[in-house]
Image: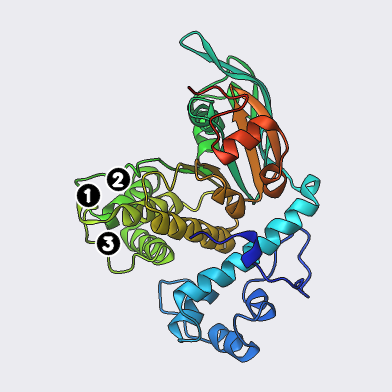
Amino acid sequence: MAMTGSDAPSSQFPLKPDKRGFYEPGRCLVECGCITEEQLQAAKNKPIPKGSEAFIDEALIDLGFINRAQMQKCLFRQFSQERRTYGARPGKATAAIRFEDVEKTLDGRKVLDHVNLEIPANRITAIIGMSGGGKSVTLKHMIGLMKPDAGKVWVGDQDISSLSGNKLNAIRRQFSMLFQGGALFDSMNVRENVAFPLREKTDLPDHEIAQRVQKCLSEVNLRGMGGKFPDELSGGMRKRAALARAMVTDPEILLLDEPTAGLDPIIENAIHYLICQTYLRTRYTMVVISHAVPEIFNWCHHAVVLHQGRILASEPSQEIKNSTNPIIRQFINGELEGPIKVV
């Protein structure tokens, strides 16, 4: 069962966040009672194998101070505190992506209707709404796979709606995407799938590619699985392999299209934990399309509600969760009766 905001510590952290609202990893685990000061220092002093990277959580697990399930809950506490900090001052977040009066019509239907939207940098934003409401089309506009009929799409200070060719490709290098089905190549093993973007888009030598692949597989808890093929993996493992491939290029912005679609509740929860853990390690800007409502509100800082091509709300996740808007309430509660007519 997914953790809720009540699972976070009841007392306030004595730590103060930095200017961006982030808490120091490791130190936060001490302050919330997950580990001791001595254990933190031992983890920091642990020798790092050649070709790997120092992750304080993995070091603590390897030393036997805490198990993986306990660590996930502790990291969730840290994330919950950062989420509350963001909710208290959302206006201070810089926009990584902006939509200005974006319109898009497909097959005679207006899919995006004067969309104005800001995606906060270095935060997780969830886009929710009814099927066919424009969520995937919004994601495709962010990465330039679609161009608006009217309006502008800004990535940082660049209007990508006016770019093409090499200039657009340069912007796209900031992005990576996890597709809904994972989109792994059946003819390649996990290691080859994860390496694919590096071999296609970079001139990195083989040994550096191998190191990056190993690092990413370790991050998603797939160490030792590189030789497996997609049809030998469970649904959750395929999602993790796809996430590793999305991270291997070290993007600034990570787009995730239904990362928990088709998974059972336990694996869905595990993927949410993994996304949270990945965020705390990397501080990527993440945009997640999800139907995992209301659980998704516990796993994002900001939420956007798209309805019939329009932005119904764009606010900190807790505010969306507690919204009194009848359309939002009907969607969150899954009720048949209400302003949304489904039968």
Contact? badges 2 and 1 (CB < 8 Å):
yes
Query: Mark 1 sits on what residue?
Result: 188
Q: Earlier in the sequence, mark 2 or mark 3?
A: 2
Taking depth in this image into account, of 188 and 10 the one nearest to the observer is 10
Query: Mark 3 sits on what residue?
Result: 226
Taking depth in this image into account, of 157 and 234 the one nearest to the observer is 234
- Amino acid carrying label 2: it is Leu
Provide residue 195's location: percent of width, then percent of height. Answer: 33, 53
Query: Mark 2 sits on what residue?
Result: 184
- In what element is the residue under mark 1? loop
Provide residue 262's location: percent of width, then percent of height. Answer: 36, 45
Estimate the spatial distance between the alpha carbons at disc 3 and disc 1, rounded to whole Å: 10 Å
- Amino acid carrying label 3: it is Gly
Q: Is residue 334 left or right of residue 117?
A: left
Category of crowding for the residue at label 1, using alpha-carbon neighbours closer than 10 angstroms: few (below 14), some (14–19), many (at least 20):
some
The residue at 22%/61% (across/down) is: 227
